[in-house]
């Protein structure tokens, strides 16, 4: 009886479980502006009808958005857990010729590629670098295919 009473008193004095973390305000995850600031604008195609809400959170005609993919090698080798070594995460930044930019981080290095389902065609280059570092390597985005290949040193 004493043990049961002591147990009730101990459990009653414990702090309540912590609240769950708030939901991610960006439903797409790590998409940011060029300085790491959150992107503002649309988040769903329904906000842009009859246009499309692209990953930079702006509305575009369907003809101005395509599928893109950034792929990379590390020291001339395909990306893998081994070739990425102590560089587990990367960051990427898409840039347009008129100075606009947006990016994503963290990007797992070992994946070897990063798809972008709604990449505006105005973005013509991509920079890829080690997350937490300002050093980057740049590559052109093929206007027809949306593909870019980055050779990381």
Image (spheres, rainbow, N blue to C red):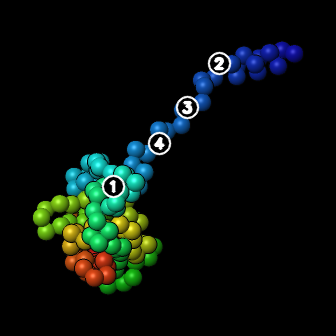
Would you name the residue on which mark 4 appears? 23
Mark sitting earlier along the chain (4/1):
4
Compared with residue 144, is residue 20 higher up or lower down, i.e. above or below?
above
Residue 13's mark? Answer: 2
Q: CA distance from mark 4 to mark 3?
A: 15 Å
Give residue 1's quadrant in the image: top right
**Residue 150 at what x, y percent from top left?**
28, 78
For mark 3, give the secondary structure: loop
Dot in front, 2 or 3: 3
Residue at (35%, 66%) from the top-left corner?
Answer: 118
Whether tag 2 and tag 1 are in contact, CB under 8 A, the answer is no
Whether tag 2 and tag 3 are in contact, CB under 8 A, the answer is no
Q: CA distance from mark 2 to mark 4?
A: 29 Å
Q: Is residue 13 left or right of residue 68?
A: right
Which of the two residues, 70 or 4, is positioned nearer the viewer here? Answer: 70
Q: CA distance from mark 2 to mark 3?
A: 15 Å
Q: Is residue 87 visible?
A: no
Compared with residue 17, is residue 54 higher up or lower down, i.e. above or below?
below
């Amino acid at each position: 009886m004493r043990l049961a009473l002591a147990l009730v008193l101990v459990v009653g004095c414990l702090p309540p479980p912590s609240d769950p973390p708030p939901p991610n305000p960006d439903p797409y995850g790590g998409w940011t502006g060029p300085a790491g600031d959150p992107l503002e604008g649309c988040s769903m195609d329904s906000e842009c009808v009859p246009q499309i809400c692209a990953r930079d959170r702006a509305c575009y005609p369907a003809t101005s958005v395509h599928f893109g993919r950034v792929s990379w090698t590390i020291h001339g080798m395909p990306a893998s857990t081994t070739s990425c070594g102590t560089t587990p995460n990367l960051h990427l930044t898409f840039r347009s010729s008129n100075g606009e930019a947006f990016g994503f981080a963290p990007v797992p290095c070992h994946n070897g590629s990063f798809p972008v389902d709604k990449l505006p065609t105005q973005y013509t280059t991509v920079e890829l670098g080690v997350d937490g570092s300002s050093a980057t390597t740049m590559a052109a985005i093929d206007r027809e295919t949306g593909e870019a290949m980055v050779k990381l040193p």
